[in-house]
Amino acid sequence: MEILIDTANVEKIRRYNEILNLTGVTCNPTIISKEKGDFWKILEEIRSVIGGKQLHVQVTAPDYEGMLREADVIADRLGRENTYIKVPVNETGLHVIRTLKEKGFKVTGTAVYMTQQAMLASSVGADYVAPYFNRMNNNNVRAGEAIAEMADLFRMHGTGTKILAASFHNTQQIMDAFLAGADACTADPSYYYAMVENPLIADAVRGFDDDWKSVYGDRRIYEL
Ligand code: G3P
């Protein structure tokens, strides 16, 4: 199970890179725009925080040549080995993914809503495909079932493409994606926080502390 975080906020990345065993960081033009800063400064800072971990960066140009030029400069500045070029899986995107793979880039096919998109992205060599869990559900696509289909398809044909599920709006969606067969999930760190910080857990910890203090007071184990 690969855990990634879907943010361009350097402080969040710094914190969660310490807490979790992250596979990497993903972002898209919307996520970068939220930081309202210099594009390269943000991404170079993220790269310095995460070292050699994966960084998935999306192209913004609408055309074939433009996307290839953007991919070149992204990989040059952020590292060819561990920077994944995110390309929307439409007709132009498929062409771009195919060319980028022939040139040796790492590529993530993004904006995936349907198994057929994932199938074509995989057929042209995408390293990852990114199904948008919440947006699929909002468009009457059962995201878990679609991810299970993608996982079956890739396994059956030995394509090597991995599923990097994204677009999560609650913690159960992340669990459902992994249970359906996603190799990786990327979400805002607030969802990982919510998985382990709730009143039930806090109450259990408080109970242990009360019982401990009733016998040992404020002393800790290293003081006994
Ligand atoms: O990277 C794609 C993902 O971030 C989209 O999420 O919340 O905009 O549907 P959302």
Image: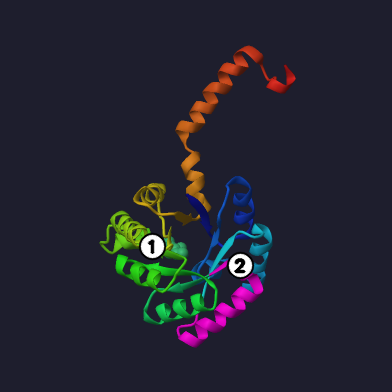
Q: Amino acid at mark 2?
A: Glu
Q: In the displayed image of the protein, which residue is found farthest to the left?
A: 140
Q: Which mark is residue 166?
A: none
31 or 23, which is in the foreground? 23
**Looking at the image, is 52 positioned above or below residue 20?**
below
Q: Quadrant of residue 90?
A: bottom left
Quadrant of ligand 1: it is bottom left
Task: Report the side of 215 relative to 197 (left or right).
Answer: right
Tell me which residue sits at (51%, 52%) in the image.
Answer: 3
Q: CA distance from mark 2 to mark 1?
A: 25 Å
Answer with the quarter of the image where residue 97 lies: bottom left
Q: Which x, y percent locates residue 35? A: 58, 66
Please, what is the dominant secondary structure of the magenta stretch? helix
Sequence-wise, the earlier of marks 2 and 1 is: 2
Does the magenta-highlighted stretch encompass residue 70? yes
Residue of label 2: 81
Disc 1 beta carbon < 8 A from ligand 1? yes
Q: Residue at x 46, y 85 (%)?
A: 64
Instruction: Locate the C terminus and report the quarter of the image it occupies.
Output: top right
Which residue in the structure is indicated by mark 1?
132
Q: Secondary structure at mark 2?
A: loop
